[in-house]
Amino acid sequence: MKRLIFAICIALLLSTVACYSATVNFAWDISSDDTTLGATGGYCLLQSKTSQSYGTVCAATVARGVTTATVTVPNGTYYWVVVAFDSDGNRSAWSNEVTAKVNPGKPNNLKIP
């Protein structure tokens, strides 16, 4: 009986988490350095709950030539920027910032200028 109650509690917890998160799809223009062989190693999508306050951990990392990313986040307001990086790990300046209030069941498609 205790195992059944525990299993039901876990199932409810997991269903609650699923109900309160959403997928966000991003797209951006290719870096001007991406057209030079080897210049751009890839892109890093930085995410924050505070405007203009980003750490160094990528919410998503994509390879050179790829200009889309998808992340799943809990409901809330978020801010994102993209940086390009080279094979040595050097990063570009942040792109323009985009923000969105993320809600499940609604389209969350953002274009980063």
Image: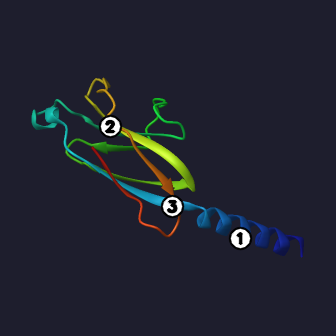
Q: Position of residue 23 (x, y in %)?
A: 46, 60
- Badge 2: residue crowd in 10 Å (few <14, some 14–19, many ≥20): few
**Mark 3 and 2 residues: CB-CB less than 8 Å, in contact?**
no
* Amino acid identity at mark 2: Asn
Of badges 3 and 2, the one in the foreground is 2
- Whether the residues at callouts 3 and 1 have beta carbons within 8 Å, the answer is no
Q: Nearer the viewer, residue 26 or 4?
A: 26
Tell which of 76 and 46 is nearer to you: 76
Could you tell whether 30 is left or right of 49 in the image?
Answer: left
User: Please, is residue 58 above or below residue 103 in the view?
Assistant: above
| Residue 37, placed above or below residue 110 | above
Q: Which mark is residue 96?
A: 2
Residue 97 place in picture, x, y as percent: 37, 39
Look at discs 3 and 1 and give the one toward the viewer.
3
- Front position in the image: 80 or 37: 80
The residue at 50%/46% (across/down) is 78
Q: Position of residue 81 (x, y in %)?
A: 37, 38
Residue that badge 3 annotates: 22
- Tell me: residue 95, above or below residue 109: above
Q: Are marks 1 and 2 in contact (CB under 8 Å)?
A: no
Q: Residue at x 57, y 55 (%)?
A: 74
Local secondary structure at mark 2: loop
Question: At 50% across and 57% down in the image, what residue appears?
Answer: 102
Of the numbered discs in the image, which one, if any, rests on residue 11?
Answer: 1
Q: Report whether 70 appears left or right of 76.
A: left
Q: Earlier in the sequence, mark 1 or mark 2?
A: 1
Alpha carbon distance from label 3 to label 2 = 22 Å
Q: Secondary structure at mark 3?
A: strand
